[in-house]
Amino acid sequence: MEDYEVYVPFQSLQALGCHVDAVCPEKKSGDTCPTAIHDFEGDQTYSEKPGHDFTLTADFEGLDASSYDALVIPGGRAPEYLALDGKVIALVKDFMEAKKPVASICHGQQILAAAGILKSFENAHNDLEELLVVAITFNCDSQRYNRCIHRDLLQGKKCTAYPAVKLDVVLAGATWLEPDPIDRCFTDGNLVTGAAWPGHPEFIFQLMALLSIKQLISDQCLSTCSTNDGLPSRAEIGLAGQSEERMRKEMERFDHERRKEEERLMREQQREEERLLREQRRESSDRSSICIKNLRIAKESMEIMEDEQLELMELAAASKGLPSSL
């Protein structure tokens, strides 16, 4: 797995007050997993360097998805193998069917594709398999999150991924969103997707929005960050207010971008329909022109034949009036 893509979400969510467990198939709590650092150094693809060993915090065997509120799927090389593991796929399906937030980045979307959850949710198959994941739960008394996928749309889930994974995502039935720039992330229903670790700030923030962590931050700020007399300071109250305001503005921006993307897709579809209609009209016009041309040729041929027949008749009449000696 990619070093940044497992460490950054894991530690960021811990810093926000979440209890975070990291698991891997066939491994237990305390085992380690090697990581690789994928960097962008001007080559045709990313470079790869050894990363840190990552220590797991829970057993994979017997993991209960109902004990967690969200799922994070890091990228790297691991997903292409984890996508073949039935237990991992089943775990992903459990989170999606429970409509809990799922955040996947980079090559992690290969697991989403294998799980069949990128197509229209109502038409998703019930057969799937596995992955390396980070599962999240709150250590506070907040409600469970019921972000429903209200979608009878024929199109699949809107998502992005590392560009090399585009084919997997599209063939899995998703609506591809171009990661331009590479740090751009998207939210569709309970699914957050990103293209690579440069998008971590956006990736974590969009997951926070699904988990309503803004309220957790505000509550913790007011309950644990206080003055000597037990009351929150002005600066701390201001920080909580700024956090909520920023969250509100970001959600408005996300909604605006989502609407813009939907409008763009509709315009593209309309332009494609208009192009096909123009081609049909042009083909119909071409066929009409061919028919007219053929009729003109046939008419000219008939006129030539009539002229030749008339000449023959004149020659025959002239030959009858000649002297018999001839």
Image (cartoon, rainbow, N blue to C red):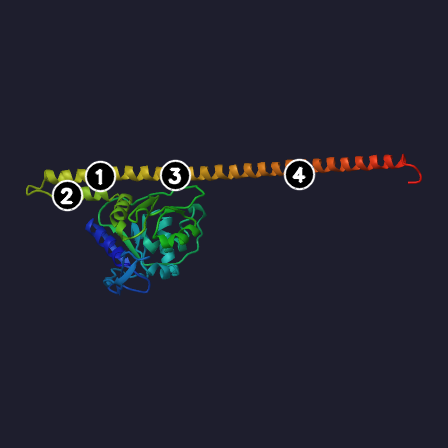
Taking the spot 35% from the left edge, 59% from the top edge, the residue there is 79
Q: Are marks 1 and 4 in contact (CB under 8 Å)?
A: no
Taking the spot 21% from the left edge, 54% from the top edge, the residue there is 11
Element at badge 1? helix
Find disc 2 in the rendering and name its residue.
223
Q: Are marks 2 and 1 in contact (CB under 8 Å)?
A: no
- The N terminus - image quarter: bottom left
Residue 218 visible in the picture: yes
Q: Are marks 4 and 3 in contact (CB under 8 Å)?
A: no
Q: Position of residue 41 (x, y in %)?
A: 27, 57
Q: Which mark is residue 264?
A: 3
Q: Position of residue 181 (x, y in %)?
A: 30, 47
Mark 2 Cα-neighbour bin, 10 Å: few <14, some 14–19, many ≥20: few
Q: Position of residue 56 (x, y in %)?
A: 25, 61
Amino acid under disc 3: Arg
Residue 95 as seen in the image, left or right of residue 225: right
Find disc 4 in the rendering and name its residue.
294
Find disc 1 in the rendering and name its residue.
246
Q: Are marks 3 and 1 in contact (CB under 8 Å)?
A: no
Distance (Cα) linking label 4 and label 2: 89 Å
Element at badge 3? helix
Element at badge 2? helix
Mark 4 Cα-neighbour bin, 10 Å: few <14, some 14–19, many ≥20: few
Distance (Cα) linking label 2 and label 1: 20 Å
Tell which residue pokes out farthest to the right in this image: 324
Camera-nearest label, 3 or 2: 3
Distance (Cα) linking label 3 and label 1: 26 Å
**Among the two numbered marks 3 and 2 on one chain, the one whose residue lies closer to the N terminus:** 2
Amino acid under disc 4: Asn
